[in-house]
Structures are given as C-alpha cells and as structure tokens.
Image (tube, coloured by chain):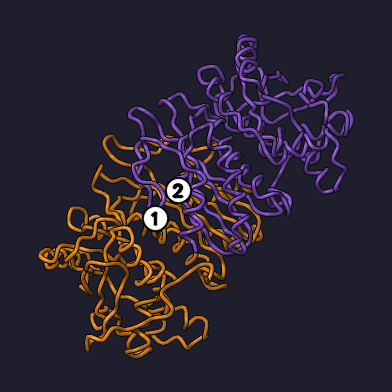
Chain colours: A purple, B orange
C-alpha cells in the first residue's frame, strides 16, 4: 500500500526538472545542485489539531504542509526546487490522499517544485515536509545581520490567520470576511518572490510563523539588537479590523502565528525602494518600527506609551 | 520550548563539517554539495507502536530513526553527510529528548553526519528523519539493473529483528540470545561501508526494511526480471536458529522486516570477490539465489520444492 500511495502522490505532483536525476521509486532520490549554488534545506511538521484544526480539508492540509516550508525558503531568499513528504495517517483513505496531493501540487506547480521522495506510515495524522532550494553563496537572508537604525518591515497583513483560527473554533457564520480570514489560515501564501527581491537589500529576515513578537525576538537575539515596534503601524486587513475591532486585531497582529509573512530589516534609506519592489510583487511591505541598541522587542502605541503583552507568541509546548 | 529542545539536540549531535555553512538556528540550513557529486536524499518516519514497540528506550529510538535512513543511503552506495529531524512528541520530556539525541548522535558520530535542521511539535510520538549523502554521478546503486544470471546476495543475517519483535511482544526472558535479537531490532546497523564497496560491483541493490520477499520483489519489478531464492541458503544467526528452530527462522528470514541488511545482485563471476570485500568490512555476504527471466520471487527448499508464502512482508497498512 505504501508504494501505491506514494505513486499516486507522485503522479499528482509530477514536475519535469533536469536536476532530478532519479525521483520517487528507489531507496533515495538522486539530485543535481546547480554549480555555484548553496543548497538551502528546512523541515517542518504539521500535526492534526495542533497546526491545523481537526477537520481541515485534505487539499488545505496538503497546501499548508508545503506552504510553511516554502515560507522558510522565502525567509532565506532561496529559490525552491525539491521536497520530501513524510505522511503519517490513520488509514489508507484514497480520497483524502488525493485531496492532499492535489493541494500540495497546486502550490508546488508554479514553482516547478518536484516531490522527490516520500514515506507513508500509519498513525495519527502528521505531515513532515523537507524542502530544498538554492541561493547564490553568501546571498542568503539571515536572522543575524539587523543593524541599529534599520527600518523593520513586514509583508502583507498580520493577524489574519490567528483570527481565522478563532472563527473556525467558534464555528462562526461564513460571511465573506470570515471566509477570507479562514482562507488565510488554511492557504497561507509563502512570500517566495518577496524573499528573492529582498536579497541584497534586507539586512535580516525571518518568516512570521510563531507571531510577530516571537519571530522579531529571534531577529533581535541573533543580531544582538533591540526592536521598537509602533503598534499603530501594524498592517491589518479590513476583514480583520471589521470583525475583531482595533484592540483585538492589534493583539492578533502582534502575537498571532501562522501568517507566514516576512519580517525584515532594511537600511532606512532603502525602505521606499524595497516597498516599491514588493508592491510590484503584489504583497506590499509596511514599515512598523526600527532596530535600536539593546535587546528584545518593545511595542509602543499611537500615543508613544509602551504596551505590555503576556502572550508573546505561539509555543508548541505551551510553556 | 521548541528552540531549546532543538538547541539541546544540536549540542548533543554537533559535528564540524566544512560543508555546513549555516546549521540549526535560522529558518533553513545553508549547505555546500561537493563539486561533481550527486546529492542523494531520502526520508523515513518511525511511529511509536508501529515501527518500534511502545516503551522502547529513547536512545534506541534515536539510533533507529537515523539507522533506517542511513540504510537507504547505504542501498544507494552513498556517503552520508547531513540529516534533518522532525520530532513530534506528547510532551517536552527533557530526559527523553536527551536520550533520543544521545542515541542519534552515537550512530551519527562515526559518519561525521551533521544534524542541520529540525522541528519539534506536540503530538503522538513520531520521528521523521531526512538524510542527505553524496555519490559520484552515475555510480549510485539502483533497484533497476539486475541482470539475468546475476547472483542474489544479502549482507549479515536475516530474520533477527522480526524475532526480536516477537520476543519483546511476548516479554520473553532476557537470555543472551534474546538480548542479541532485541538489539538487532532496536539498534540496526546500516550497511553504509558495504554499500560503498558495492559501487561498481553490484548491478542492483535495496535495503531489507520490509522483508526479503517484499524487497527482492521491488528489485524484480524495477529490473523486469524474476528471482529464485534457495531457502536453505538464507543466512541466520545462531541466536535465531536456537530460539526459533529451522522452519520459523526460515519464515522470519524470508518475510520479517526491519533487518536493514542489503540485498544486491552481482554477476556470478564476481561473487567471491564481493564476498571477500564485505567480509573485510565485518558484515559478510551470502549468496541466496539467482536472477532469472520472468517476474516475481520464487523460493525453493533444500529439496528443490517450491515454497508458498502467504505473508510476503511488512505492509504499513496491513492490506
């Protein structure tokens, strides 16, 4: 059964790439990394009921399992190439597998990302995806590298996915705004093109998976700097503001995970150029603060008062 | 918590490698594939109670999660380099994590294999490991390639791990023979050096994870040939023969999974040379049959009679 499942997934995710010398079907894949490129690799796991609500559609799970990994490549400024899928599921439900593969393939296709290996096992629904991409040596975007005085920017809007999760949990009625927010939860858009555009411009970059405060904190720790964020500048969707209001939407934008936008720092004088570049890519970028001496992330309100937060982000072990 | 768990695992598995440009700690790792080498990648998952008995020691689980993946590299004739670990566990049990990392590191160390990425999530105990290795272009061992008249050989002994599983399930007393068989289940030895030695010699190769009949069947299907196996030639340990007797040990050697020995085919005239090479590596190799025209695997007893088997190997979905 393992072989037919993976074969079916392979059929649904087929991509012709010259650098795949041997794909799914042997003990391992054989791949060619282009001369003069660094290999960029990451792995991320989605667990049913932890990283997506129990009952999420198979196609959404397939999409998201790849999206969260492509987001890691985006945060490094890498070009996606290949993925491996380790799929654990309670039973060999062919319709579920086909839906999952279709969602995965839908996101993979525009990147010509090839699924080159997989494993299916029986157990609680869990997906681990490992992704591989390329970057010219020395050009990867890192968490370390933020400079005092840099502007802090984010792509897209924040807080939508966390709001979508609340709406799913509350089984809220599906008006257009709720549908939009739930789509942001289930079908996150990895900012791959933005990451490529930021190469050579951003001094530091991370993707927002655990929430802005937590992930900005990782940039601060890696760069040995502090960050000041102006809460009044946080980009929020009209759906989020409409349904949750000013304060709750602000808190979701600061602490909600799962948005998979990029948070990056650039020299202040380059902000306008970078914003123009990312606007052309359709995701835009908003300046939300600046890098300062010190450590940790401070958030200020419109009145300049410092805000305090207890819940600083998503933690998989809740401690 | 996620970051400290992975940091602790990183500390326990640290390996200095020039080709790791950036390891654990950013959104992805940055790696350099040596010029002129193909990249070999595989992913395999272990689920608690499916791929190891519930209650298996953490260090054994850590070892085995890497071993089953190194075995895939061995079957390709690849040199191990890097791994990614996706670890799902019910709670942040530090002693368990440290045991797991210690077992992983114990196997990784002699190969100088570096753990370059990881993810920890909450859920049912599941480990997915992705491994990366190198092989000179065109020299990888494949399942396809077996030729009519080739000798079929296996490394080591077969059936031990499946016997070990029976002993664990029956909570049998731990005499030295039982201990040996359970060790074969919990601490399989990936035949990495044997795989390297088989490059240029073997026409086809696979690792025996699902059982000899099932895995030999994969070679037959990929090579479009048949196989005849002489059951009287199956290499079995004295512990297995002592505790299980002739017939049960034969069936375990044919159908039991989890041995992670290599099954390969070589031109008949090269058998003696290959056996001498592998004997020097400490695992030995036994000729158990030959490649014939046709399809599928036939097994004959010492009297030449064809044997029939209902259970042809391990299937994760039991169908």
Residue A99: x %, y % from top left: 62, 49
- SS at badge 1: helix
Residue A319: x %, y % from top left: 72, 51
Q: Disc 2 and disc 1: Cα gap in Å?
A: 9 Å
Q: Subunit of mark 2?
A: B
* Mark identifier at residue B119: none
Report the number of discs: 2
Residue B239: x %, y % from top left: 34, 84
Q: State the residue in front, B42 or A117.
A: A117
Is residue A71 shown above or below B56? above
Task: Identify the residue under disc 1.
Answer: B108
Residue sitting at 63 percent across and 30 percent down? A220
Q: Subunit of mark 1?
A: B
* A266 with respect to B83 (left or right): right
* A319 with respect to B20 (left or right): right
- Direction left: furthest residue: B269
Quadrant of the rendered image containing residue B213: bottom left
Task: Identify the residue under disc 2.
Answer: B115
Residue sitting at 54 percent across and 17 percent down? A201
Is residue B10 visible in the rendered image? The answer is no
Given contact means CB atoms under 8 Å apart, are the residues at marks 2 and 1 in contact?
yes
Is residue A281 visible in the rendered image? The answer is yes
Is residue A284 shown above or below B193? above
Residue sitting at 63 percent across and 58 percent down? A125
* B318 with respect to A166 (left or right): left
- SS at badge 2: strand
Neighbours of disc 1 within 10 Å: few (<14), some (14-19), many (20+) = many
Q: State the residue in front, A302 or B82.
A: B82
Residue A139: x %, y % from top left: 46, 24
Q: Are marks 2 and 1 on the same chain?
A: yes
Neighbours of disc 2 within 10 Å: few (<14), some (14-19), many (20+) = many
């Amino acid at each position: 059964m393992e072989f037919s499942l993976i074969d079916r997934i392979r059929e649904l995710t087929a991509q012709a790439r010259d650098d795949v010398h041997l794909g799914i079907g042997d003990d391992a894949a054989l791949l060619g990394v282009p001369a003069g490129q660094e290999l960029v690799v990451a792995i991320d796991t989605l667990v049913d009921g932890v990283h997506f609500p129990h009952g999420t559609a198979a196609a959404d799970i397939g999409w998201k399992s790849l999206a969260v990994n492509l987001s890691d490549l985006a945060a490094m400024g890498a070009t996606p190439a290949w993925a491996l899928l380790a799929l654990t599921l309670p039973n060999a439900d062919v319709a579920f597998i086909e839906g999952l593969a279709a969602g995965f393939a839908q996101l993979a296709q525009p990147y010509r990302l090839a699924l080159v290996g997989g494993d299916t096992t029986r157990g609680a629904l869990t997906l681990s995806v490992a992704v591989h991409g390329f970057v010219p040596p020395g050009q990867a975007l890192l968490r370390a590298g933020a400079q005092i005085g840099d502007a802090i920017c984010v792509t897209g809007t924040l807080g939508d996915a966390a709001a979508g999760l609340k709406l799913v949990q509350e089984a809220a009625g599906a008006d257009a705004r709720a549908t939009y927010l739930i789509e942001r939860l289930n079908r996150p858009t990895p900012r791959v093109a933005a990451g490529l555009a930021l190469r050579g411009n951003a001094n530091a970059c991370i993707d927002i998976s655990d929430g802005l405060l937590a992930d900005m904190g990782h940039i601060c720790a890696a760069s040995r700097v502090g960050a000041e964020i102006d809460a009044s500048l946080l980009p929020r969707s009209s759906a989020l503001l409409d349904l949750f209001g000013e304060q709750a939407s602000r808190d979701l934008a600061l602490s909600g995970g799962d948005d998979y936008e990029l948070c990056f720092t650039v020299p202040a004088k380059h902000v306008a150029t970078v914003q123009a570049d990312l606007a052309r890519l359709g995701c835009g970028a908003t300046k939300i603060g600046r890098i300062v001496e010190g450590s940790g992330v401070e958030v200020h309100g419109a009145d300049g008062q410092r805000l305090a937060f207890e819940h600083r982000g998503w933690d998989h072990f809740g401690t």
